[in-house]
C-alpha cells in the first residue's frame, strides 16, 4: 500500500475536470479556494459550524470544509456558479433577490445550494421543513424569515408547475 | 511536503494490513466531520490518514436472522432514510433528525461517531439502548464488543490501533417503544447538554423491560442500570417516575463545562427520563 | 402606516416609472447587490488574489497579562519561503491615537491608544505580537511556531470593579485604568425617591458579545507602480487610511483603501483589523500580501460588545408616574480604549430611556482590564442600559399591578419633551404609538397546551440615535455625473455592509433624476476615487450619504430643468422629471427627453457633474463630566413585543412570536428596512438567550462557533414588522436610521416575557436555560419559606 505525502486530486468542478496536487490533510474547501480558485464557496469557520462552504458532492449538499479533498477525487462537485443554467437554481436566485433574502450575501451561495437540494428532493416542503433543511447554514443578517419566504415562494411555484414527483437525489446539469 | 500521509485501501484486508503495519501512526478517516476540525486544531498530529471510505464491505444495512447489521460507513442521513432502521431500531432512527445538522448528516458515519467516543455523541446513545455490538476487525480476527464495553472514556474506546470498526449489530426490537430526546443550547448544530435513549416494553402502564441510555451525563454515554432495575415490573405511576428520577440523578456523573454545570446536567437527567417515559406511554 | 407583506413572488423587477405617480422610493425592490451575490460573483475580501501574493499570519499572545522579555525571530526568518517577520520594533509608529474618520480633533478624552503590535507589556490574550509573510499559508503558520517569545506572566485584572479600586493592577504602562466617567444630573433624586410610593432596585449584568459576521476579517495589500500602498479590505471605515499612513510613516495620499462588499460588519469592522499589518508587510516585502483571520482568531482578536454592570434604582408614585431614577453603569473596556468613551457616552445619554423623569442621576464609568478589548457593536452603548431601564419599568408595573403598555404610555417621551440631558425633541416621538401597535399585534396570551410550558408576553421600548455624536462634526459627500447617453455614474465612499447602503443611494438618484436604476452605476468605498462619505457606522449612512446624494441629485436636476425651461419655454417650477423625460404635466406637449436636455447642457458647457457635501449639526466637544445639551442629531424610536414559551422543567426559552414596530421616518426601500428590523431583532435575541462570549481570567472559553451560539433557522420565530412612517427623520424624505435601533429593545422584551411567564426576573444575561431554571428554583424556595 502506497503512502503519499502529496496526492494528486482530480475533481470535476461544475462540469470541468480540474487536477492538482494537494496535501493529504487538505479539505475540499481549501482545494477549491486555493488551487481551483473556485471562490463562490466561502470559508466562514472552517470547522463545520456555519455552512458557508456548502456545495454538492455525490449529489448531496455537504460542508466542504469537512470533506477531505482526497475523498472528492474522481467525483463531481457543483457550486452555485456551476448551476447558473439550472432553472430551479435560477428560480431560487431570483426569489432570494426579490424577497430581500440577501443582505451581506456571505451565506447566500451555501444557502442556495442547500435550498436547491431541498426542493429537488422534496418539491413542496412546508415552512417548518424549509427551516429544518436550512438549519446547517447560518445567516447573521436576515433573521432567516426572508430566506424562508424566498424558498417557500419557489416551492409554491413548483407546486403549480408540478415538475416531477419522487426523489431526485443526484443533481444533474440541466 | 506535508507531515501527513494519505492511503486509500481498496479492500478491508488491505486496510487491516495497513493498520497492522502503521499501528498508532495511522488515523482512520471516513466522514471526516470530526477529523478535519481536529487536524486544524492540532489535536491530531502528523500521521497517515487511512481513508476507508471506499470499502464496500463497510457499507449497507442488512438483516441477518434476528439481527440488524449496519455497516460502519453508513451515514446518519442513510439511517434516517432506512425503513429497516425505522422499524427494527427505531431509537437509532429517531436520533437522525437531531444529529448535528442536515448537511453534516450527509457525511458523518455511525462508525465515526463510535470511534470518536465523545461523551456527548448522539449516535452512540441509541446503540447503547439497543444493546448493540460493535463489530471490530483486525487481520487476525473479527470480534464483537458490546457498545457499553467499547466506550472506555471521553474520546477513548476499546478499539486497538490495528483494528477497524466494520459495523454495528443489534437484535430487532419491534416490541419495545423507543424515545430519543436531546437537550441542547439550540435546536440545530447543538452539542447535547444531556440526551436520553429509552426503549421500554410495556404491559398497560407496567414496565416489562426497559433500557435507558444517557448521553453527556458521564465520561462516556452510559446505561442507567439502577434506574432500569427499579422500573422493571413497576407501573409508571407518578410516584414511581419521581423515584426513578431520583435514582437516575444519582447515576448521572456529568462534568461542569462552559455549556452547563454538573448540577444542572444532573437535573436534566431526571427531566429527560420523565419526558421519555411520558412519551413512551402516550 | 402599517405595511403589509406583499409577495412579489418570482416576478422580475417591474419596469420602473411606468406611471407618473410611481416612484422608486418606498417600494419593495431588490437591492443592486442582490443579483451578483445570488450568482456567487461578488468578490469578497478573501476572494481576491494577485500574482506573487504572499500569505500573512499573526502571532498572538498566549497570556492575558505578561511582560515580553525577549522575542527571537531568527528561526522563523530562516525558514525557506518566509519573506518577513515583524515585531513592534519594525513599526515606524507603533503607538498612536485611534481615529475613526472624524474631521475634528476631539481630544484625548475621546480617543484612546491604538497599538499595532505588543511592546513590552501584553494586555490581553490574543494581542498581536508579531507578523509573518510567507509564500504559503502553511509556511506562515509554521513560521509562527518558530518565533520564540519569552513571557513573564503578570497577575492582571479581569473585573472592571476590581480594576477601579485603588492599587489595582495597572493594565497599561502608565495610564490609569479609568477610561472615562460621565454624569447626568437632573432635579433632586433624593427628594424624588422620598416622594415615591414604590422603588425598585436591581443590578443587571450583560455579557461580552461577538458580532459573529460570517466573513472573518480579511484583506489584500500591494504597492503599486506609483509607490502607493493599496489595501483592499473588508472594513466599515475606509478612512482608516490616515491611521495606516501614520503607522508606516507615509503621507496620507500614499495610502489607498478600497473597501469590499462586506460579509457582515455590525460594528466589528469599525476598528482597524488587518490594514496596518498588511501595509507593513507589503512595504517590507514589496509583494502583495493577503491576511485573513480564522474564525477562532476573529473571536479572539476583534473588539467585543462591552459587558456592563448596571445598578438601577427607579421610583414611581402609586398611579405609575416615574419620579426618580438613579443609575450607576460600569463598563469593561478590556485591554485597550478603542471606542469605549463614545460608547459610554451613548450609554450615559440613554441611561434613563425614553421617559419623562423629573429627577435623574446617572454615573457611568469604564475601566481597562486584561480582557479582550471592547468596542463598537450594533447598538453601541444604547443596548446595555435598555436592558436595565426596560426591566426596571416592567418591575414597577408588576409591583403596581399595572399593564406594561399602560405604564409606558404614562411616562414615555412625546414631542416637545426633553431627555434628562436637556435634549429637546422638536419632532414626532413615536414611543407610545410603537408600543401600542406592537402590543396589540401580539394579541392575547394563548393558553399553554403543555403542562411544562408557561407562556408569557413581554414588551420593551427603545431609543437610539442615528448619526454620529455631533461633536465629531460629521459630513458626507457624493459625486454624480450624467453621461452623454443618459446613464449615470455615482461615486460615494460608502462602505456597504449588506444593508442596502449603496443601493439606497442609487434609488435616491433614480427618484430625483427620473432615470431607471439599470442605468445608474455606483462606485463605492475607494479613498482614492470616491468622495469620502465617512464611516458605515452609527446608523449614519442613509442619513448622511443619503442627504449628500439627495443634495447632489437635486443640484443636477435643477440644471437640467433650467436648461429645459429654455428649450420648452416653460417655467422650471412647472416641469417634472420622470421616465427619462422632462415634461409639463399640465401641458404634456411641453416635453423633451432627458437625453435631449443632457445633449443641450453638454453643447453649452454646462457641468453635468456635481459633488455635494452634507454636514450634520455640529456641537462642541464636551469638556465636563456632566453631559448636557445636544449630543446627537436625532433618535429613532421603536418597540419589541414578544411571546415566549418557558419550559419550567428545564428553563429553556422559546421565542414564539416577535413583533418589531419602529418609526422609520420613511422607508426608502421597504425590503431593506424590513430586513434591518427582522435581522436586528434576531441578532439581539441571541444576546438575550444564547450568545455568551465567556472569558475567565482573561482566557476565552468560547473559541469557535461551536461554543458561541448564534441562532439557526429553527431557533427563530418569523419576525413581524410594523413600520410607522412619520416622516419626522432628518434623512432623505424624512427617513430615520434603523440599522442599530432595530436590535435595541428585543433583549429586555424577552426578559420581561420570561418574567411574565414564570415570574422570575433574570438580571444576568444571557437567559440560558440553566440560568432561568435556577432562578425559578430560587423563587420556589423563597415562596416556600
Image: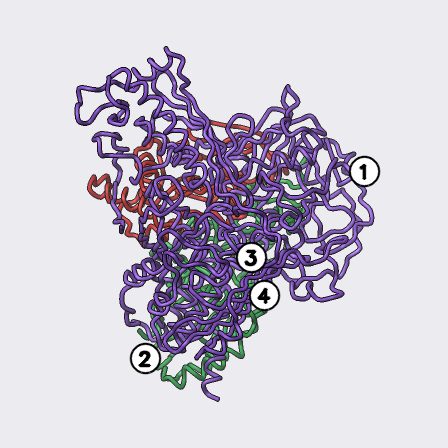
Q: Position of residue C468 (x, y in %)?
A: 51, 46
Q: Chain of mark 3?
A: C
User: In front: C497, or A38?
Assistant: C497
Q: Position of residue C149 (x, y in %)?
A: 78, 47
| 3D distance between C-alphas at marks 4 and 3 | 43 Å
In the image, which lettered chain appears green? Answer: B
Which residue, given by chain and number where applicable, does mark 2 sit on?
Answer: B203
**Tag 3 or tag 1, which sits nearer the N-term?**
1
Task: Point out the frontmost of discs 1 and 3.
Answer: 3
Q: Which mark is residue C122?
A: none
Which residue, given by chain and number where applicable, does mark 1 sit on?
Answer: C74
User: Mark 1 falls on what kind of element?
Assistant: helix
Which residue, given by chain and number where applicable, does mark 4 sit on?
Answer: B257
Q: Chain of mark 2?
A: B
| 3D distance between C-alphas at marks 1 and 4 | 40 Å
Identify the residue at the far right of this view.
C69
User: Mark 3 falls on what kind of element?
Assistant: loop
Task: Kindly indicate whether the residue at mark 4 contacts the one at mark 2 (C-beta within 8 angstroms).
Answer: no
Which residue, given by chain and number where applicable, does mark 3 sit on?
Answer: C627
In the image, which lettered chain appears red? Answer: A
Amino acid at each position: 500500500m502506497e503512502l503519499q505525502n502529496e496526492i494528486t486530486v482530480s475533481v470535476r468542478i461544475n462540469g470541468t475536470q480540474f487536477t492538482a496536487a494537494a496535501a493529504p490533510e487538505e479539505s475540499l474547501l481549501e482545494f477549491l479556494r486555493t488551487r481551483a480558485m473556485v471562490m463562490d464557496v466561502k470559508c466562514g469557520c472552517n470547522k463545520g459550524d456555519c455552512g458557508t462552504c456548502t456545495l454538492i458532492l455525490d449529489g448531496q449538499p455537504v460542508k466542504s470544509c469537512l470533506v477531505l479533498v482526497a475523498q472528492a477525487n474522481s467525483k463531481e462537485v457543483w457550486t452555485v456558479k456551476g448551476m447558473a443554467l439550472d432553472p430551479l437554481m435560477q428560480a431560487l436566485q431570483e426569489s432570494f433577490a426579490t424577497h430581500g433574502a440577501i443582505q451581506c450575501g456571505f451565506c447566500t451561495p451555501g444557502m442556495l445550494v442547500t435550498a436547491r437540494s431541498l426542493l429537488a428532493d422534496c418539491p413542496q416542503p412546508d415552512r417548518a421543513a424549509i427551516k429544518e433543511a436550512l438549519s446547517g447554514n447560518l445567516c447573521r443578517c436576515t433573521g432567516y424569515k426572508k430566506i424562508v419566504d424566498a424558498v417557500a415562494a419557489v416551492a409554491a411555484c413548483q407546486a403549480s408547475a408540478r415538475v416531477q414527483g419522487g426523489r431526485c437525489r443526484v443533481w444533474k446539469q440541466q | 511536503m506535508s507531515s501527513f500521509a494519505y492511503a486509500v485501501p481498496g479492500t478491508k484486508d488491505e486496510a487491516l494490513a495497513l493498520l497492522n503495519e502503521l499501528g498508532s501512526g495511522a488515523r482512520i478517516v471516513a466522514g471526516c466531520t470530526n477529523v478535519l476540525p481536529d487536524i486544524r486544531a492540532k489535536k491530531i498530529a502528523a500521521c497517515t490518514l487511512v481513508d476507508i471510505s471506499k470499502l464496500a464491505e463497510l457499507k449497507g444495512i442488512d438483516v441477518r436472522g434476528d439481527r440488524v447489521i449496519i455497516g460502519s460507513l453508513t451515514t446518519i442521513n442513510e439511517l434516517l432514510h432506512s425503513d429497516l432502521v425505522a422499524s427494527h431500531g427505531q431509537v437509532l432512527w429517531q436520533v437522525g433528525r437531531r444529529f448535528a445538522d442536515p448537511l453534516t448528516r450527509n457525511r458523518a458515519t455511525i462508525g465515526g461517531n463510535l470511534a470518536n467516543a465523545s461523551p456527548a455523541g448522539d449516535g452512540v446513545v441509541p446503540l447503547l439502548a439497543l444493546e448493540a455490538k460493535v463489530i471490530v476487525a483486525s487481520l487476525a480476527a473479527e470480534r464483537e464488543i458490546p457498545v457499553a464495553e467499547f466506550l472506555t472514556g471521553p474520546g477513548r474506546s476499546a478499539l486497538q490501533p490495528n483494528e477497524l470498526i466494520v459495523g454495528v449489530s443489534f437484535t430487532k426490537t419491534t416490541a419495545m417503544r423507543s424515545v430519543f430526546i436531546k437537550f441542547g443550547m439550540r435546536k440545530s448544530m447543538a452539542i447535547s447538554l444531556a440526551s436520553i435513549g429509552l426503549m421500554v416494553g410495556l404491559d398497560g402502564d407496567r414496565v416489562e423491560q426497559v433500557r435507558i441510555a444517557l448521553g453527556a451525563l458521564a465520561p462516556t454515554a452510559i446505561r442507567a442500570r439502577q434506574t432500569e432495575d427499579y422500573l422493571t415490573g413497576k407501573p409508571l405511576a407518578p410516584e414511581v417516575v419521581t423515584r426513578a428520577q431520583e435514582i437516575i440523578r444519582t447515576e448521572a456523573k456529568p462534568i461542569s463545562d462552559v455549556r452547563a454545570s454538573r448540577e444542572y446536567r444532573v437535573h436534566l437527567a431526571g427531566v429527560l427520563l420523565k419526558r421519555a417515559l411520558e412519551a413512551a406511554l402516550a | 402606516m402599517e405595511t403589509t407583506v406583499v409577495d412579489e413572488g418570482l416576478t422580475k423587477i417591474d419596469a420602473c416609472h411606468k406611471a407618473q405617480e410611481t416612484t422608486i422610493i418606498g417600494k419593495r425592490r431588490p437591492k443592486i447587490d442582490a443579483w451578483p451575490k445570488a450568482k456567487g460573483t461578488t468578490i469578497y475580501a478573501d476572494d481576491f488574489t494577485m500574482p506573487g501574493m504572499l500569505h500573512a499570519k499573526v502571532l498572538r499572545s498566549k497570556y492575558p497579562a505578561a511582560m515580553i522579555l525577549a522575542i527571537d525571530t531568527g528561526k522563523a526568518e530562516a525558514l525557506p519561503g518566509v519573506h518577513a517577520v515583524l515585531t513592534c520594533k519594525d513599526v515606524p509608529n507603533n503607538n498612536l491615537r485611534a481615529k475613526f474618520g472624524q474631521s475634528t480633533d476631539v481630544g484625548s478624552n475621546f480617543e484612546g491608544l491604538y497599538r499595532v503590535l505588543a511592546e513590552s507589556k501584553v494586555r490581553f490574550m490574543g494581542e498581536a505580537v508579531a507578523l509573518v509573510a510567507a509564500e504559503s499559508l502553511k509556511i506562515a503558520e509554521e513560521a509562527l511556531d518558530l518565533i520564540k517569545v519569552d513571557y513573564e506572566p503578570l497577575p492582571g485584572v479581569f473585573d472592571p470593579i476590581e480594576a477601579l479600586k485603588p492599587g489595582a493592577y495597572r493594565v497599561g504602562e502608565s495610564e490609569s485604568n479609568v477610561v472615562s466617567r460621565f454624569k447626568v444630573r437632573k432635579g433632586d433624586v433624593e427628594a424624588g425617591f422620598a416622594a415615591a410610593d414604590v422603588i425598585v432596585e436591581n443590578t443587571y449584568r450583560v455579557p461580552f458579545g461577538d458580532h459573529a459576521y460570517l466573513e472573518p476579517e480579511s484583506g489584500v495589500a500591494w504597492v503599486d507602480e506609483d509607490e502607493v500602498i493599496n489595501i483592499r479590505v473588508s472594513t466599515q471605515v475606509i478612512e482608516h487610511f490616515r491611521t495606516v499612513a501614520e503607522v508606516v510613516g507615509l503621507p496620507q495620499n500614499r495610502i489607498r483603501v478600497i473597501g469590499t462588499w462586506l460579509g457582515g460588519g455590525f460594528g466589528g469592522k469599525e476598528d482597524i483589523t488587518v490594514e496596518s499589518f498588511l501595509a507593513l508587510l507589503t512595504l517590507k516585502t514589496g509583494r502583495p500580501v493577503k491576511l485573513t483571520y480564522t474564525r477562532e482568531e476573529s473571536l479572539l482578536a476583534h473588539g467585543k460588545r462591552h459587558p456592563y454592570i448596571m445598578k438601577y434604582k427607579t421610583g414611581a408614585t402609586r398611579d405609575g408616574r416615574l419620579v426618580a431614577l438613579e443609575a450607576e453603569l460600569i463598563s469593561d473596556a478590556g485591554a485597550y480604549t478603542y471606542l469605549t468613551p463614545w460608547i459610554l457616552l451613548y450609554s450615559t445619554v440613554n441611561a434613563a430611556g425614553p421617559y419623562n423623569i423629573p429627577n435623574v442621576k446617572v454615573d457611568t464609568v469604564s475601566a481597562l482590564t486584561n480582557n479582550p478589548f471592547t468596542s463598537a457593536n450594533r447598538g453601541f452603548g444604547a443596548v446595555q442600559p435598555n436592558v436595565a431601564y426596560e426591566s426596571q419599568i416592567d418591575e414597577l408595573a408588576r409591583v403596581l399591578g399595572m399593564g406594561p403598555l399602560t405604564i409606558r404610555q404614562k411616562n414615555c417621551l412625546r414631542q416637545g419633551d426633553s431627555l434628562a440631558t436637556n435634549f429637546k425633541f422638536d419632532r414626532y416621538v413615536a414611543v407610545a404609538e410603537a408600543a401600542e401597535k406592537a402590543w396589540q399585534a401580539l394579541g392575547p396570551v394563548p393558553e399553554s397546551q403543555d403542562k411544562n410550558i408557561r407562556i408569557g408576553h413581554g414588551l420593551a421600548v427603545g431609543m437610539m440615535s442615528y448619526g454620529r455624536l455631533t461633536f465629531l462634526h460629521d459630513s458626507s459627500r457624493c459625486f454624480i455625473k450624467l453621461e452623454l447617453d443618459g446613464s449615470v455614474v455615482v461615486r460615494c465612499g460608502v462602505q456597504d455592509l449588506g444593508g442596502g447602503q449603496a443601493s439606497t443611494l442609487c434609488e435616491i438618484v433614480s427618484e430625483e433624476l427620473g432615470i431607471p436604476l439599470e442605468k445608474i452605476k455606483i462606485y463605492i468605498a475607494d479613498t482614492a476615487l470616491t468622495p469620502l462619505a465617512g464611516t458605515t457606522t452609527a446608523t449614519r449612512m442613509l442619513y448622511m450619504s443619503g442627504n449628500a446624494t439627495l443634495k447632489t441629485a437635486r443640484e443636477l436636476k435643477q440644471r437640467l430643468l433650467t436648461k429645459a425651461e429654455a428649450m420648452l419655454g416653460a417655467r422650471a417650477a412647472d416641469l417634472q422629471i420622470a421616465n427619462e423625460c422632462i415634461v409639463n404635466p399640465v401641458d404634456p406637449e411641453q416635453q423633451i427627453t432627458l437625453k435631449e436636455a443632457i445633449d443641450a447642457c453638454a453643447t453649452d458647457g454646462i457641468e453635468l457633474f456635481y459633488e455635494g457635501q452634507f454636514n450634520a449639526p455640529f456641537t462642541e466637544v464636551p469638556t465636563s463630566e456632566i453631559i448636557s445639551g445636544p449630543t446627537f442629531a436625532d433618535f429613532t424610536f421603536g418597540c419589541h413585543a414578544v411571546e415566549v414559551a418557558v419550559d419550567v422543567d428545564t428553563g429553556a426559552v422559546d421565542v414564539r412570536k416577535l413583533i418589531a414596530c419602529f418609526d422609520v421616518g420613511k422607508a426608502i426601500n421597504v425590503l431593506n428596512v424590513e430586513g434591518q428590523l427582522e435581522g436586528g431583532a434576531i441578532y439581539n435575541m441571541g444576546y438575550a438567550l444564547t450568545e455568551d462570549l465567556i472569558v475567565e481570567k482573561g482566557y476565552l472559553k468560547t473559541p469557535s462557533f461551536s461554543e458561541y451560539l448564534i441562532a439557526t433557522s429553527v431557533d427563530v420565530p418569523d419576525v413581524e414588522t410594523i413600520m410607522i412612517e412619520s416622516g419626522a427623520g432628518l434623512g432623505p424624505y424624512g427617513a430615520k436610521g434603523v440599522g442599530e435601533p432595530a436590535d435595541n429593545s428585543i433583549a429586555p422584551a424577552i426578559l420581561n416575557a420570561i418574567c411574565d411567564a414564570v415570574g422570575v426576573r433574570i438580571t444576568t444575561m444571557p437567559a440560558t436555560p440553566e440560568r432561568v431554571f435556577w432562578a425559578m428554583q430560587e423563587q420556589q424556595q423563597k415562596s416556600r419559606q
